[in-house]
Amino acid sequence: MSETIDQAERTRRRHRRDAFHLAASHTKMPDDPTDLEYDYTFNYLTTGPPRRSTLTNYGTRALLYKIKSDFVRELAMTGGDVQSPRFMELLGQMRHLYDPTSFDARVRAHSDNEKKLEGMWLTLSKPNYPGNLGRYNGSGGYLYSFGHMAMNMVPSDLICCIDGTFNPVHYVHTKDRLSLMDSGGVPDKLKALVSAKKCILRSSDIVSAVTIIPGLSLPQGCVSLVHSPNRLVLRPMRALLSIRGYLVAHPEQKNRLLAWFSHGSFEVSDDDRDQQTWRHILERTMSSVLYPERQQQRQSPQQQLRLEADGKLSFQMPPDYNEELMYVDVLYLDETIRVLQGGRGTIYVMARVPYFPDE
């Protein structure tokens, strides 16, 4: 069902969408080595040792700077490939110089501490969703279906190009933690840990600025256009996919964070033509899920979808989604770069965003 929202909320959502898309366009690094040397983001990440580095040996700091430059350059030139031999070699060198005892996820870092999880992070590594459909010729971004990006919570084959993925991380204060507990937003296995007063809880969202690609602009052979919802799209449409997640520090391992996800949303540009196309897509592809009353049926627990008046599509993770505990280990963390490894071995590389237009 659609819900009425006021103009102030519409404006806030529009500004948020615009801010993430603007940040995505300003922080995207070119894959050409010649252009890379003049790129702002690349130079911000590699222009010298961290200003507040805990490394006291200047020679070590200079060596780490050189390795980090090669590390970021390798990611830019390979489209975020974290499995290449050169990437693994450079990561090993960085970890060799890194002091793992200098970070403890169980302690809230001071605002001037370089090893701080809180902040806005940009993903440099290739997206890890299943079903990659190649790269979009227009921007070089990776193509995935909306359903896969929404962690299979939305039954949609709509193909989108990822322009940039961000990870805002914030400390959760006691009052908000209690509200989260009361709302049932914490997995049963973690309730005792999260309710502990000394526990450090952080929100950790995945926010992707995406473009819905016109059917005629999709790479040849990518999908069958006859059956793709993208056939209804006549021009690129900007959208924002947000998934709310949480991180709680492992009580015994200082570099490990237990993770879970609770809900998400997908917002399309509020341009009249884009909204008309978006609602047309929903009517054609998800009518039975969004409007079960038309078929005299009810949504299943896996189909907890809600469509709002401005076209925002919200979804809720079912109770059994977080049954298997997920975790990430912090392999490397300094003022500008963060490297995590998931429980299944997947490596994620993020860069701290130097300036975010919505802050």
Image (cartoon, helix red, strand yellow):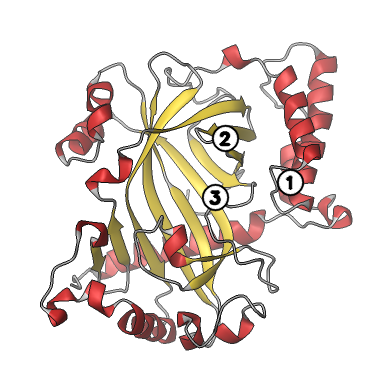
Q: Which residue is mark 2?
A: 345
Residue at mark 3 to residue at mark 1: CA–CA distance:
22 Å
Frontmost of labels 2 and 3 is 2
Q: Percent position (x, y) of residue 14?
A: 40, 67
Which residue is labeled 1 in the image? 75
Amino acid on which disc 3 is placed: Phe
Residue 145: numbered disc? none
**Residue 346: in sight, yes or no?**
yes
Instruction: Say which label, 3 or 1, has the lower sequence index.
Output: 1
Amino acid type at circle 2 is Gly
Answer left or right for 15 relative to 199: right
Image position, residue 25 (x, y; %): 63, 61
Q: Could you classify mark 3 by the number of other residues whose Cα lies within 10 Å: few (under 14), some (14-19), or many (20 or more)? A: some
Residue drawn 46% across the image and 49% down it: 206
Seen in the picture, residue 116 relative to 120 is either above or below; the reply is: above
Q: Position of residue 13 (x, y in %)?
A: 37, 63
Mark 2 and mark 3 in contact? Answer it, CB < 8 Å: no
Residue at 75 percent of width and 50 percent of height: 76
Residue 356, numbered circle = 3
